[in-house]
Amino acid sequence: MKTPRAYYQPLAIGAPAPYREVPTRLERMIHFVPPHIEKMRKKVPELIRDVDVVLGNLEDAIPADQKLAARQGFIRMARDNEFGSTGLWTRINCLNSPWVLDDLLEIVPAVGEKLDVIMLPKVEGPWDIHYLDQLLAQLEARAGIGRPILIHAILETAEGVKNVDSIATASPRMHGMSLGPADLAASRGMKTTRVGGGHPDYAVLSDAGTATGRTAHLQDLWHYTVAKMVDACMSAGIRAFYGPFGDFSDSEACEFQFRNAFLMGCVGAWSLHPSQIEIAKRVFSPDPAEVAFACKIVDAMPDGTGAVMIDGKMQDDATWKQAKVILDLAERVAAKDPEFAEIYGL
Ligand code: GLV
Ligand code: MG
């Protein structure tokens, strides 16, 4: 364990100082782009206007014989566009793959100045973060990059889940974490063939012999992991995200999965298909009725202390803090999205 002072020292001479806080940004959806496909790269200017984060994917879903084209395509899309307040991320290949070293050696010098976050797949423990942290510091120093590139871990192995707390606190370079339900299912030996979402057989059955008959009640396969991830992230001052939802034909189920994650503390999810952008926008922007109620709480308790009754419900310092979570998010959404600014009246 490092001493507090050493924790915030740059890991290479000439590398930028680590952030003390993760920069505040709206990140309701991380939109995945396959950068080897020119038609997809051409859509990036439109995406920049529409989404909160554009991510060039180099890992799974990119065929082995297209890995180099994806890397070059990502560099091109980063160079050819101005991203403004929209985040620019890439998902590199995993640390034991034959591609990852050149992903980093080529991307950081070429477009590191524009790159906000590197998503690192299949993180098993803090040692994976330490390796990338050190290498990024060396590359940033050599390329003269002025601000640190952050690391976002995918939580998608049984060992990673076991080590989630030490991954979250491994470095001040940590931005946050996403649940990767597809790889995690395989790593855990779950008997499913899906990318996220529920399963019709994962249920509890009500007692036999009741007048209304027996009913099966669906359970959320991801509840335990999302809760564990949110606690690890929030206690470390970093962000938690739900990852992919693979059934593009079932937007309702996607919305339910995203909303469970939102209510549990996640700030966003991945969008793998254009239809999921709107879903994420709707789910990860606070409900206007909740924003209006949160305003009432804050107005009734300007200094955040005491107890008041609003619409028959008791409010105190703790509900004031909940209201602040919702209002702070609503303000970030309103600043980016005039439509929501109008709906919220902010
Ligand atoms: C994402 O990468 C997943 O495995 O779910
Ligand atoms: Mg995965």
Image: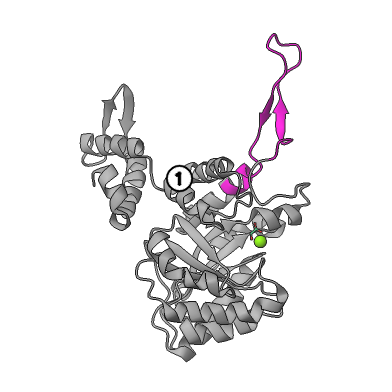
Q: Where's ligand 2: which quadrant? A: bottom right
Mark 1 neighbour class, 10 Å CA radius: few under 14, some 14 to 19, many 20 or more: many
Q: Is residue 111 magenta?
A: no
Give the colour scheme shown.
one colour
Residue drawn at (44%, 48%) of the image: 284
Residue drawn at (46%, 78%) of the image: 78
- Residue 118 can be seen, yes or no: no
Q: Is residue 292 left or right of residue 22?
A: left
Residue 254, given in percent of the width and then of the height, sits at 56, 45
Residue drawn at (45%, 63%) of the image: 53
Query: Which residue extends farthest front?
Result: 39
Q: Which of the 4 image quadrants contains residue 206?
A: top right
8 and 292: which is toward the camera: 292
258 and 2: which is toward the camera: 258
Q: Is residue 211 magenta?
A: yes
Amino acid on which the number 1 mark rests in the picture: Val
270 and 14: which is toward the camera: 270
Q: Which residue is mark 1?
A: 283
- Find the magenta span and give its range: 199-226
Residue 65, given in percent of the width and then of the height, sits at 71, 78
169 and 51: which is toward the camera: 51
Q: Is residue 199 left or right of residue 8?
A: right
The local secondary structure at tag 1 comes to helix
Q: Is residue 97 left or right of residue 289?
A: right
The answer to whether residue 169 is above or below residue 245 is below
Residue drawn at (55%, 44%) of the image: 251
Query: Which residue extends farthest bottom?
Result: 142
